Image (spheres, rainbow, N blue to C red):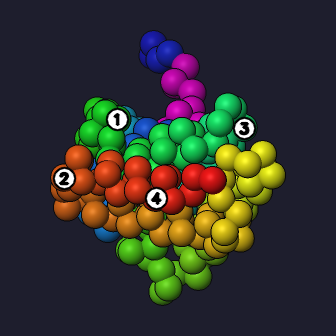
Amino acid sequence: MARTGRPREFDKDRTLERALELFWSRGYGATSIQDLVDALGVERGSLYGAFGDKRRFYLEAVRLYWEVYERHLTAALDTGPLLPALREILSHPVRLDELVSDAGMPQGCLVGNTTAELVPQDGEATDVVTRSYRRFTDIVADALRRAQAAGEVTDGARPEAQAQMLLYLVQGLSLVSRAGLDRTAALAAVDAAVDGLRA
């Protein structure tokens, strides 16, 4: 009997990245294990062996999403003047159509979507999103604190309160973007928020 070639190695990291795109474009509830099998080109047993059930797979994708987002957020806020960087971050939900992939167009923020779909019923999902929101406000508040000291940002409010306001704005834009939004009006809202921070 002829020997078959060695089975292709299962790339867990790449599989997770591709699953993230699928979950982000369709949502948790609308993505079945069969959808993942078909889109990722891997066997069901490989997925279960690597990630467990769909819920665990999804939460791994959300964690990866946040890790990448946090790296970009930190890097953006560490370079140059703060207010242009904040404008770029806040306007990101308005420009999601630029991120279309084979899996489809992203829908809002994956952490925000997880909040809407799984919180508060799922304790682990709640922990993931709570930590993500806390990290956002911590990172942004640190940057705002530096910008206040440099005279770029108004000191009329505590940096923590300013960061919380920006979290609410970016999550609100992410949610509304799922239903479609007026890009001009959304960017005007971002500009108003940024101008309100100016010293």
Q: Residue at x 55, y 20 (%)?
A: 6
Q: Is residue 9 magenta?
A: yes
Task: Identify residue type, mark 1.
Answer: Leu
Q: Which residues are magenta?
A: 6-15
Choose the circle earlier in sequence order: 1 or 2: 1
Alpha-carbon distance for marks 3 and 2? 30 Å
Choose the circle earlier in sequence order: 4 or 2: 2
Q: Nearer the viewer, residue 1 or 97?
A: 97
Q: Residue at x 53, y 64 (%)?
A: 167
Alpha-carbon distance for marks 3 and 1? 24 Å
- Tell us which disc is closer to us: 4 or 2: 4
Q: Residue at x 64, y 42 (%)?
A: 82
| Residue 45: x %, y % from top left | 47, 50
Choose the circle earlier in sequence order: 1 or 4: 1
Task: Identify residue type, mark 2.
Answer: Asp
Alpha-carbon distance for marks 4 and 2? 17 Å
Task: State the SS at label 3.
Answer: loop
| Residue 76: x %, y % from top left | 63, 37
Alpha-carbon distance for marks 1 and 2? 18 Å
Task: State the SS at label 2.
Answer: loop
Q: Nearer the viewer, residue 125 or 195?
A: 195
Q: Residue at x 47, y 17 (%)?
A: 4
Task: Identify residue type, mark 4.
Answer: Ala
Q: Quadrant of residue 145?
A: bottom right
Residue 182 badge:
2
Task: Identify residue type, mark 3.
Answer: Asp
Residue 78 badge:
3
Label 1: few (<14), some (14–19) or many (≥20) C-alpha neighbours in 10 Å: few
- Tell us which disc is closer to us: 1 or 2: 2
Name the residue carrying label 4.
Answer: 193
